[in-house]
Image (cartoon, rainbow, N blue to C red):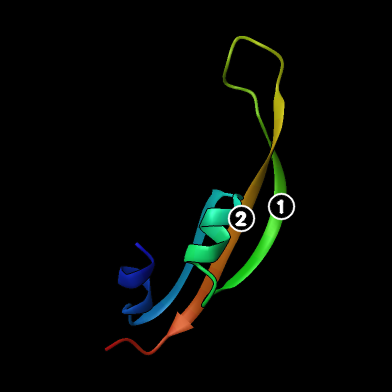
Amino acid sequence: MAEKLAGLKGALILSINDRPEVRAIFERFEMEGATTTYSISKGEPSKVGELIVSGGFKGG
């Protein structure tokens, strides 16, 4: 996915699980960590880390 995104003409914003391996894959992009709450399950809502990946690209 990172290779496809790097070739885009334009800009992008991607929200994805914040995990060390995800940060390594998208290291060439701008990243910002965030916390969100998932509440769709029957149990208690849980706070999880999200990674906001963004950038503007010239494409190829």
Q: The disc labelled 1 sits on which kind of residue?
A: Ala
What residue does disc 2 label? Answer: 51
Residue 55 location in percent, x, y? 52, 77
Category of crowding for the residue at label 1, using alpha-carbon neighbours closer than 10 angstroms: few (below 14), some (14–19), many (at least 20)? few
Residue 37 location in percent, x, y? 69, 33
Q: Is residue 10 above or below residue 60?
A: above
Q: In this view, does 46 lie above or below 22?
A: above
Nearest the eye: 21 or 40: 21
Question: Could you tell me which residue is drawn at 33 percent across and 71 percent down?
Answer: 3
Question: Could you tell me which residue is drawn at 61 percent across and 55 percent down?
Answer: 51
User: What is the number of the mark on residue 20?
Assistant: none
Question: Could you tell me which residue is drawn at 57 percent across and 21 percent down?
Answer: 40
Judged from the image, the secondary structure of the residue bearing numbered disc 1 is: strand
Residue 49 location in percent, x, y? 68, 44
Q: Is residue 23 above or below residue 59?
A: above
Question: Could you tell me which residue is drawn at 30 percent across and 70 percent down?
Answer: 4
Contact flag, marks 1 and 2 (Cβ < 8 Å): yes
Q: In this view, does 27 lie to the left or right of 46?
A: left
Q: In which quarter of the image is the C terminus?
A: bottom left
Q: Report, in whole angstroms, how far the alpha carbon at label 1 lies from the one at label 2.
A: 6 Å
Q: The disc labelled 2 sits on which kind of residue?
A: Leu
Nearest the eye: 25 or 31: 25
- Among the 4 quarters of the image, the one containing residue 20: bottom right
Judged from the image, the secondary structure of the residue bearing numbered disc 2 is: strand
- Among the 4 quarters of the image, the one containing residue 8: bottom left
Category of crowding for the residue at label 2, using alpha-carbon neighbours closer than 10 angstroms: few (below 14), some (14–19), many (at least 20)? some
- Of mark 1 and mark 2, the one earlier in the sequence is 1
Residue 38 location in percent, x, y? 63, 29
Q: Quadrant of the N terminus?
A: bottom left
Q: In this view, does 13 lie to the left or right of 43?
A: left
What residue does disc 1 label? Answer: 34
Q: In this view, does 37 lie above or below 39?
A: below
